[in-house]
């Protein structure tokens, strides 16, 4: 067969397979966009486990006509300049979420920037664009995604029940809320409000948000982490060794504002609690690391949930020490030194 260049909409669909695996990944991409846009309040409404409808409403900076048109193009982003792939500070940067979603759903993007008298709405229906058309709306952006994967039966087949997809969306929202206490999040189901986490600020903001999302009993049974070592700042709450779970689902890890899964962090927590908990019990933790963006690579996977530390050993040591010291202050004495 001769080699040929693939048409644009096919390229977008192939990329969509990586970026938008399921409704929860759409929610994650869109809410991250709202956070990057400086939104203070973000409302997420879903129906049918997000397969029928996902609607994200934010009060962020909005987009003017030119930006709106560019936003749904592939590799169009306002967040990356040519030489800063090593220094990523926003949640998005690949510029492919909206283009990908528009290729596998009916996407509408309505936006009104500050100073504009009204908004504009652009529709991309499974790769076919129409608009923009004027639309009355508040400042900010409203994005609707309808009938996700309805034209991609192979994809739709792999989705779980509406209930399971709703649970995955809730998990994504919890992580985003834990990472962004300064933002008011509202999560709505088909006909009822399921979560409402008002913005919290000030010194106790993090603990307050963790109380909203994880429950007051966790906050009451946890010690605060506060440590800086070898360029790693560790914050968050570590559950007392008496407050454990049978699985690791209640361990949350954030690096530079992003929820991550990472073996170095999981291993460090296990080591920090080794002297205090039984092997089959898992401490509840919400661990927040701040580290020089140049010392982590988040560009490992399109969903950006994985990362790679340049100095895994240093990170491990900082986490073990932060937890060890906090537990020590709470009266727990390790048999091995925490000074490792
Ligand atoms: P990325 O986030 O990687 O830049 P996206 O496809 O998610 O790529 O978004 C493309 C662009 O559209 C963003 O860079 C941003 O300029 C704009 N955009 C998307 N969502 C919003 C929003 N909610 N508010 C303002 N601008 C947005
Ligand atoms: Mg994005």
Image (cartoon, helix red, strand yellow):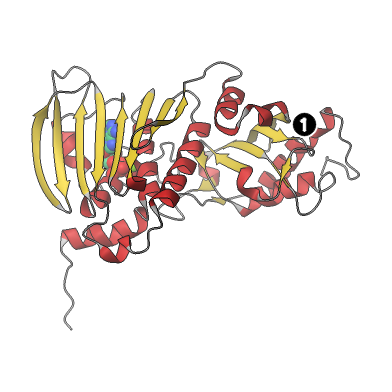
> Left or right: 120 with respect to 231?
left
Residue 78 in picture, x, y percent from top left: 28, 37
From this view, report whether residue 314 is shown above or below residue 155. Answer: above
Q: Residue at left 69%, top 52%?
A: 267
Quarter occupied by the N terminus: bottom left
Q: Is mark 1 within 8 Å of ligand 2?
A: no
Which one is nearer the viewer's eye here, 166 or 242? Answer: 166
Residue 312 is situated, as x and y percent measured from the top left of the image, at: 64, 50
- Which one is nearer the viewer's eye here, 292 or 248? 248
Q: Is residue 50 left or right of residue 258?
A: left
- Identify residue for label 1: 326
Can you see residue 249?
A: yes
**Residue displayed at 28% across by 43% down:** 53
Q: Position of residue 218 (x, y in %)?
A: 67, 32
Q: Quadrant of ligand 2?
A: top left
Residue in the foreground of this view, choosing between 50 and 231: 50
Q: Quadrant of the C terminus?
A: top right
**Residue 296: x, y in percent?**
53, 46
Name the outermost residue toward the bottom. 1
Identity of the residue furthest to the right in this view: 335
* Label 1 environment density (alpha carbons within 10 Å; few <14, some 14–19, many ≥20): many
The residue at 21%/44% (across/down) is 107
Quadrant of residue 156 within the rendered picture: bottom left
Indicate left or right for 68 with 301 as reference.
left
Residue reaching furthest to the front: 191
User: Mark 1: which secondary structure?
Assistant: helix
């Amino acid at each position: 067969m001769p080699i040929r260049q693939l048409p644009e909409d096919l390229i977008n669909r192939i990329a969509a397979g990586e970026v938008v695996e399921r409704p929860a990944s759409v929610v994650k991409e869109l809410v991250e966009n709202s956070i990057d846009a400086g939104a203070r309040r973000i409302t997420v409404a879903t129906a049918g486990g997000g397969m029928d409808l996902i609607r994200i409403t934010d009060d962020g900076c909005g987009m003017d006509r030119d930006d709106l048109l560019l936003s749904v193009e592939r590799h169009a982003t306002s967040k990356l300049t040519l030489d800063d792939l090593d220094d990523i500070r926003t949640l998005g940067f690949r510029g492919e979420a909206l283009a990908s979603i528009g290729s596998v759903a009916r996407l509408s993007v309505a936006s009104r920037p500050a100073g504009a008298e009204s908004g504009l709405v652009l529709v991309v229906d499974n790769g076919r664009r129409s608009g923009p058309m004027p639309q009355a709306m508040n400042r900010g952006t409203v994005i609707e995604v309808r009938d996700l994967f309805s034209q991609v039966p192979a994809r739709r087949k792999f989705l779980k029940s509406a209930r399971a997809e709703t649970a995955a969306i809730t998990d994504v929202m919890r992580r985003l809320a834990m990472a962004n206490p300064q933002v008011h999040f509202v999560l709505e189901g088909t006909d009822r409000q399921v979560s409402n986490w008002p913005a919290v600020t000030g010194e106790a903001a993090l603990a307050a948000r963790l109380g909203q999302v994880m429950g007051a009993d966790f906050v009451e049974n946890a010690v605060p982490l506060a440590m800086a070592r070898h360029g790693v700042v560790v914050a968050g709450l570590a559950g007392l060794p008496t407050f454990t779970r049978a699985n690791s689902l209640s361990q949350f890890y954030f690096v530079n504002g992003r929820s991550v899964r990472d073996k170095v962090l999981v291993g460090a927590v296990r080591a920090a609690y080794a002297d205090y908990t039984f092997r089959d019990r898992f401490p509840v933790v919400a661990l927040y690391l701040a580290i020089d963006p140049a010392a982590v690579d988040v560009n490992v996977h399109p969903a950006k949930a994985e990362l790679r530390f340049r100095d895994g050993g240093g990170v491990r040591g900082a986490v073990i020490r932060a937890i060890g010291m906090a537990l020590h202050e709470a009266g727990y004495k390790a048999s091995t030194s925490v000074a490792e």
